[in-house]
Amino acid sequence: MRAPEPEVRLPAPMSANRSGPAFRTRAPDELRRSRRPRAHSCWDHLYAAPLWPLHGANLGTLARTCDAVGACITVPRFPWVPEALARGNTLRKPVCTHRTGDPLGWLARQRERGARIVGVELADEAVRLADLAPARSPTVMVLGHEQHGIPPEALDLLDECVEIPMVGTGSSLNVAVAGSLALYKLAGLL
């Protein structure tokens, strides 16, 4: 016969020491009034560039993150991309979107104009996400193909690579999750 479990007493909630609730949630209407009334235009500062996407759902997630941090998204001119962006954009407002038919040429032009080009990739000499400096000048965050990563010919156009440390057994995160984390860090919001 097992002995009874000892009684565990949990500490009182933080609000027990305060007059009123510890946290207050805001209604969606109140949140909307406190934020931008319309989508931002291109600020030419921070771009998410998923230039070799495989899954449309990832583009929708990245578009939402771009809106959240004030970034633009640059996508390839694949026939399915506009529908994927529209389906994933639950904001019902347009997100700052640029399109390119030549991803390598677009990256080269961004680099020529002085933009910082950061690849999210598992690579030698990659900096940890925690050590990634925020964007202080025009910055492009490049994301590769979900299975193959950033193509070798594009790696030569990068100024730096960032990797997201993982302690689990997986080798990488979903591209939209990894891109969202890097965007928040580059935007100076983490």
Image (spheres, rainbow, N blue to C red):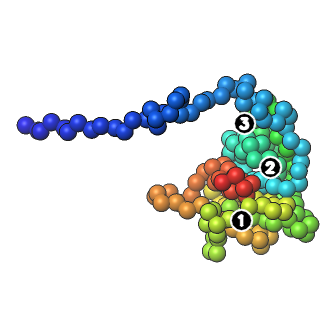
Residue indicated by mark 2 = 71
**N-terminal label among 3 and 1:** 3
Residue drawn at (55%, 62%) of the image:
165
Taking the image as shown, residue 19 lies to the left or right of residue 62, namely left
SS state under label 1:
loop
**N-terminal label among 2 and 3:** 2
Q: Looking at the rendered structure, which numbered label has been put on residue 88?
A: 3
Counting from the top left corner in percent of width and height, residue 96 is at: 85, 44
**N-terminal label among 2 and 1:** 2
User: Which amino acid type is marked by label 2?
Assistant: Ala
Q: Nearer the viewer, mark 3 or mark 1?
A: 1
Q: Looking at the rendered structure, which numbered label has been put on residue 133?
A: 1
Q: Is residue 51 above or below residue 11?
A: below
Residue found farthest to the left: 1
Q: Separation of disc 2 and disc 3 at Cα? A: 16 Å
Q: Separation of disc 2 and disc 1 at Cα? A: 16 Å
Residue drawn at (78%, 35%) of the image:
35
Q: Is residue 1 above or below residue 172?
A: above
Counting from the top left corner in percent of width and height, residue 78 is at: 81, 47
User: Which amino acid type is marked by label 1?
Assistant: Ala
Q: Where, quadrant-wise, is the C terminus in this rendering?
A: bottom right
